[in-house]
Image: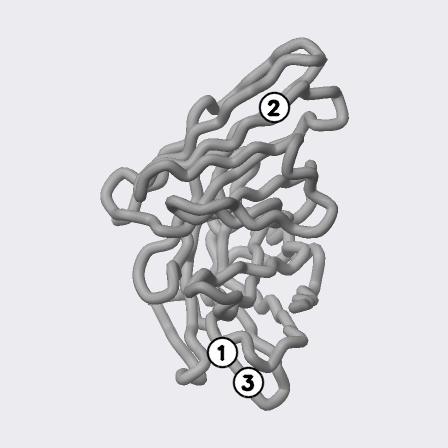
Amino acid sequence: GENVEQHPSTLSVQEGDSAVIKCTYSDSASNYFPWYKQELGKRPQLIIDIRSNVGEKKDQRIAVTLNKTAKHFSLHITETQPEDSAVYFCAASKDSGAGSYQLTFGKGTKLSVIP
Amino acid sequence: GAVVSQHPSRVICKSGTSVKIECRSLDFQATTMFWYRQFPKQSLMLMATSNEGSKATYEQGVEKDKFLINHASLTLSTLTVTSAHPEDSSFYICSAGEGIGGQPQHFGDGTRLSIL
């Protein structure tokens, strides 16, 4: 099955600096890669996603890049703010049959933005 | 935006009790819903895929007789933890997918289950 590795497990940055979180996946058939932000005790919230036919996607301070050949994708947060502090999860997905896409999650990165 | 409602948010009960958790997609129809379990400071582990009108597909190691899933309509899936024991205590989260192939998935608020 799919295996998603995520690094680093913890990341501390100064407010205003950039943060980068990297993930690799094992199944070349995976074609959808979302990123979720989860604050303590709350639901994971989708912040950005990318499909395999695109190499990069940007939404204001957040961007995701995908390298299909190397099977890795990264989340980039620029101009970080204290409210960006949370746990971030990457995930990979493909059609598991009968049209349902199952997500395989990375282990998460705890981002701390220091004011 | 797509909203997924999950109830209850918190359950505390005695060992041996059965607990039902509901997951509803409020503004879209979801042929497929997913149930996850999350331990403290860990990632989300998929327990089962819930398909409307058919039997759920369970991940390896998840007891189907322990975790009963019913997906009776396009907007409702339920997870029943039968005869719960302290080791079943965890954070359970559902998700429902919209769009092509059920993506992106939107998550409910989760249910924190504590078995005494």
Residue located 38% across and 44% down the image: B53
For marks 1 and 3, give the CA distance: 7 Å
**Measured from the top left, where is residue B12 in percent x and y?**
60, 14
Front position among marks 2 and 1: 2
- The label on residue B113 is 2
Taking the image as shown, residue A13 lies to the left or right of residue B29, namely right
In the displayed image of the protein, which residue is found farthest to the top? Answer: B14
Q: Say which quarter of the image contains residue B100.
A: bottom left
Q: Are marks 1 and 3 in contact (CB under 8 Å)?
A: yes
Q: Residues within 10 Å of mark 1 (few under 14, many from 20)?
A: some
Local SS, label 1: strand
The answer to whether dots 2 and 3 both sit on one chain is no
Residue located 56% across and 20% down the image: B19
Q: How is the image coloured?
A: one colour
Whether A90 is drawn above or below B89: the answer is below
Residue indicated by mark 3? A67
Whether B114 is drawn above or below A6: the answer is above
For marks 2 and 1, give the CA distance: 37 Å
**Measured from the top left, where is residue B25 in percent x and y?**
32, 40
In the displayed image of the protein, which residue is found farthest to the bottom? Answer: A69
**Measured from the top left, where is residue A75 in percent x and y?**
52, 68
Which of the pair A70/B46 is nearer the observer? B46
**Amino acid type at image mark 1:** Thr
For marks 2 and 3, give the CA distance: 39 Å
Local SS, label 2: strand
Front position among marks 2 and 3: 2
**Amino acid type at image mark 3:** Asn
